[in-house]
Amino acid sequence: MSYSHHSMGSGSRTTRRSFDFGRTHVVRPKGKHQATIVWLHGLGDNGSSWSQLLESLPLPNIKWICPTAPTRPVALLGGFPCTAWFDVGELSEDGPDDWEGLDASAAHIANLLSTEPSDVKVGIGGFSMGAAMALYSATSCALGRYGNGNPYPINLTVVVGLSGWLPGSRGLRNKIEVSHEAARRAASLPILLSHGTCDDVVPFKFGEKSAHSLNIAGFQYLTFKTYEGIIGFDLDVQDWSLHCS
């Protein structure tokens, strides 16, 4: 599926970026369908590898949707093209956010959830850059809009992030505090974050800072779990069961 966004260039010129998303893999629930989770891969990965792993988890009531990000040049890799949900130059609170890429991916993810049955809980999870994308979707859900101002259409019931970070953290608290509805949605959205203390790709401090930024912005229903080493990849099955059943 392709998404096109317009942005203003120098002078009065308008530039157009098109985002072509890769193949989406779906893992059907083995039991009663109670929840649907869109699971997002990390930088340079694809939906297929995660769908195989998620299918093995003892969570029979969850349907997994595993999309593949567009292939695009990534500044962090010196412009080398690979699958990425958005462009990123450095992991820094002072670095620029690729709002256009974030919004395009968030809209694609929301669209994947738009046809789920009304009695099924819906959520977003991810690993590394996929976790960052899931957290951006969480803030869009709370604010009720994407960064470009378009309305966010999905009522998320759970968000999970493994070894990720929070894009767009600057000013998030102020944006939520000025809206009673945004504050209410933020306070009621369950978020489960986990990070390894020895993560050398997305350093642990970014996980900590992200959890802190979300907390002070009003996301009160947040759990942050620390693992020794790189990552404790058991996906906290009990926590998933509590949030998704």
Image (cartoon, helix red, strand yellow):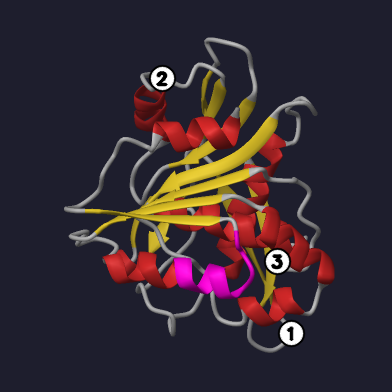
Q: Secondary structure at mark 1?
A: loop
Badge 1 vs badge 3, beta-carbon distance below 8 Å:
no
Amino acid type at mark 3 = His
User: Earlier along the polypeptide chain: callout 2 or callout 3?
Assistant: 3
Between 36 and 10, the one nearer to me in the picture:
36
User: Which residue carries the number 3 mark?
Assistant: 6
Residue 213 is inside the magenta segment = yes
Quadrant in which the N terminus is drawn: top right
Amino acid type at mark 2 = Pro
Residue at the limit of the structure toward the bottom, as seen here: 11
| Residue at the (36%, 19%) spot, across then down | 56
Badge 2 vs badge 3, beta-carbon distance below 8 Å:
no
Against 92, residue 152 (above or below) is above
| Residue at the (57%, 51%) spot, across then down | 19
Overall secondary structure of the magenta section: helix
Against 103, residue 162 (above or below) is above
Q: Give the percent coordinates (x, y) of residue 211.
A: 46, 66
Tell me the quarter of the picture where residue 147 sits. bottom right
Amino acid type at mark 1 = Ser
User: Which residue carries the number 2 mark?
Assistant: 58
Image position of 129 (left or right of 217): left
Q: CA distance from mark 1 to mark 2?
A: 55 Å
Between 46 and 199, the one nearer to me in the picture:
199
Span highlighted in magenta in the image: 211-220
Q: Give the percent coordinates (x, y) of residue 194.
A: 37, 52
Q: CA distance from mark 1 to mark 3?
A: 12 Å
Q: Secondary structure at mark 2?
A: loop
User: Which residue carries the number 1 mark?
Assistant: 12
